[in-house]
Image (spheres, rainbow, N blue to C red):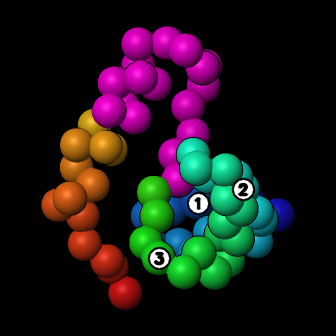
Amino acid sequence: MINEGGVKEGDRAPALKVTSSDGSTVDLSSPGQPLVLYFYPKDDTSGCTLEAQNFTQLAPTSRRRA
């Protein structure tokens, strides 16, 4: 369960499994590679589309934080 304060940058992801865009299952407690997990309030809006596009554009410049 996520604490009342929410998840902060640098926190480990809660133990859950999600389906990635390629259909594979990713265990967030041990993803095997760096990942970006983001949430948005409403699907199919200009805001969520722009945010997703920004993540895609920034992917090559991302670096692993250990």
Q: CA distance from mark 1 to mark 3?
A: 19 Å
Is residue 28 visible in the rendered image? The answer is yes
Count all numbered tags in the image, as a single digit.
3
Residue linked to disc 2: 18
Q: Residue furthest left?
A: 61
Judge from the rendering whether residue 22 lies leftward or rightward of residue 62; answer left or right: right
Name the spot of residue 63 as percent of width and height, x first. 25, 72
The residue located at (34%, 24%) in the rendering is: 50
Name the spot of residue 52 as percent of width and height, x first. 40, 34
- SS at mark 2 in the image: strand
The residue located at (70%, 71%) in the rendering is: 27
Quadrant for the C terminus, please. bottom left
- SS at mark 3 in the image: loop
Q: Quadrant of residue 40?
A: top right
Q: Of circles 1 and 3, which is in front?
A: 3
Judge from the rendering whether residue 22 lies leftward or rightward of residue 24; answer left or right: left
Judge from the rendering whether residue 57 lies leftward or rightward of residue 53; answer left or right: left
Name the spot of residue 2 as percent of width and height, x first. 74, 61
Position of residue 20 relative to residue 29, above or below, is above
Kind of residue sitting beneath label 2: Val
What residue span does the magenta drawing correspond to? 37-53
Quadrant for the N terminus, please. bottom right
Q: Nearer the viewer, residue 36 or 33?
A: 33
Mark 1 burial class by Cα count in 10 Å: few <14, some 14-19, many 20+: few
Residue linked to disc 3: 33
Q: Of circles 2 and 1, which is in front?
A: 2
Residue linked to disc 1: 7
Kind of residue sitting beneath label 3: Gln
Q: Are marks 1 and 3 in contact (CB under 8 Å)?
A: no
